[in-house]
């Protein structure tokens, strides 16, 4: 177990060191904050073209829009209890406008990413015309398709045809290399009808078995751990990691420091900018891990603000 006091420790850090968006997200999930407050802060990251930028994905500081940063915005919005219709409509139009017919999907970031501080894996290679992230089609294209399927009445793209392509892509993989590509399929899975879920369940299950690291001695490095794949018992594929969830919870309770968890990676450059990014990642990881522990009843003395109000 960890203690409820750890939540306050985390909040004080986020409040004093991180962007206002991170604070509003934490307040929403743990302190009875409103979803409208999150939308108000998230709006500052949305550009006129409808896409999101401005370091919303903290490993690249590109102010211009990117499909990758826009997926992060949807991840945040999908966790809220209300919807900002205008924000979503603009984002869908951005997805429509940046769809590449030759790729049958999206490129993660534009080449302008090189003009701003970024992690080396986000470097745009002018020779290949892409980042190394783009070696794996599903990141972020598979995730974008799930977001578009949810709002398919607002998109001009043939989502059905594209989803069939996405299913063929993962089904034809001879080796699972990118956990992040698999994460994108996993995030899309709950949004889909049963017929598509049935086709995806086998490849996703195989991918998790192939990539999930169960050696706890390696968990302090950048490896895909059980909860990296699925963070909630409510997810329809949670059973694929359930046998390892207690082990991961134990690890989280052992590695928390002053209410926080920090990233296990660095940029190896742009040192001053990395210091800012590291704080943002600490907020993201801490919020995620505290939510996991709360759902697994591992926070002693915690009372949900809404439940407390009902009492």
Image (cartoon, helix red, strand yellow):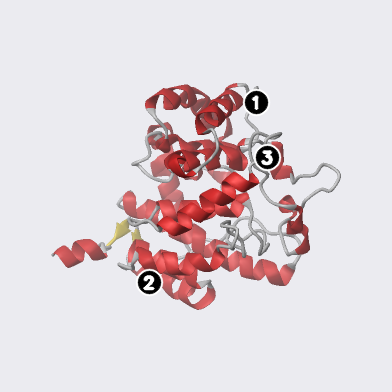
Query: Label 1 belongs to which residue?
Result: 175
Q: Nearer the viewer, residue 18 or 111?
A: 111
Task: Please give left or right for residue 60 compared with residue 77 in the image.
Answer: right
Residue at image location 26% in from the left, 62% down from the top: 304
Could you say where residue 300 lies in the image, as x and y percent from the top left? 29, 60
Q: Nearer the viewer, residue 58 or 45?
A: 45
Q: Residues within 10 Å of mark 3 (few under 14, many from 20)?
A: few
Residue at image location 46% in from the left, 54% down from the top: 88
Q: Nearer the viewer, mark 3 or mark 1?
A: 3
In this picture, is 92 found above or below 194? below
Q: Residues within 10 Å of mark 2 (few under 14, many from 20)?
A: some
Furthest toward the front, the residue is 156
Q: Quadrant of the C terminus?
A: bottom left
N-terminal of the pair, mark 2 or mark 3, is 2
Task: Please give left or right for residue 301 compared with residue 126 in the image.
Answer: left
In this picture, is 186 found above or below 222? above
Q: Quadrant of the N terminus?
A: bottom left
Q: Nearer the viewer, residue 1 or 289?
A: 289
Query: Label 3 belongs to which residue?
Result: 100
In this picture, is 166 found above or below 191? above
Residues at badges 2 and 3 in contact (C-beta under 8 Å)?
Answer: no
Residue 278: quarter of image = bottom right
N-terminal of the pair, mark 3 or mark 1, is 3
Which mark, residue 8? 2
N-terminal of the pair, mark 1 or mark 2, is 2
Q: How far apart, in angstroms, are the residues tagged by discs 2 and 3? A: 45 Å
Q: How far apart, in angstroms, are the residues tagged by discs 1 and 2? A: 43 Å
Confirm whether residue 261 shows in the render.
yes
Under tag 1, what secondary structure?
loop
């Amino acid at each position: 177990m960890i203690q409820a006091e750890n939540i306050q420790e985390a909040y004080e850090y986020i409040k004093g060191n991180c962007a206002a968006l991170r604070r509003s997200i934490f307040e929403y999930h743990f302190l009875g904050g409103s979803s409208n407050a999150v939308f108000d802060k998230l709006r500052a990251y949305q550009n006129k073209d409808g896409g999101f930028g401005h370091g919303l994905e903290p490993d690249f500081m590109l102010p211009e829009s990117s499909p990758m940063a826009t997926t992060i915005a949807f991840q945040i919005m999908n966790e809220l209890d209300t919807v900002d219709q205008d924000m979503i409509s603009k984002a869908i139009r951005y997805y429509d406008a940046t769809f590449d017919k030759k790729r049958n999907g999206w490129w993660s970031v534009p080449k302008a990413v090189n003009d701003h501080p970024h992690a080396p894996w986000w470097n745009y290679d002018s020779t290949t015309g892409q980042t190394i992230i783009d070696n794996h089609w599903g990141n972020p294209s598979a995730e974008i398709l799930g977001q578009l399927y949810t709002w398919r009445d607002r998109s001009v793209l043939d989502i059905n045809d594209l989803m069939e392509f996405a299913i063929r892509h993962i089904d034809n993989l001879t080796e699972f290399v990118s956990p992040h590509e698999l994460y994108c399929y996993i995030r899309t899975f709950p949004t889909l009808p049963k017929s598509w879920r049935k086709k995806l369940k086998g490849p996703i299950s195989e991918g998790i078995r192939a990539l999930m690291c169960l050696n706890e001695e390696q968990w302090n490095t950048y490896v895909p751990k059980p909860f990296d794949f699925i963070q909630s018992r409510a997810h329809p594929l949670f059973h694929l990691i359930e046998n390892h969830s207690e082990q991961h919870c134990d690890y989280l309770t052992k590695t928390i420091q002053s209410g926080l968890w920090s990233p296990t990676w660095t940029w190896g450059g742009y040192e001053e900018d990395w210091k800012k990014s590291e704080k943002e990642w600490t907020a993201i990881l801490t919020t995620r891990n505290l939510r996991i522990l709360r759902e697994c009843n591992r926070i002693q003395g915690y009372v949900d603000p809404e439940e407390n109000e009902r009492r």
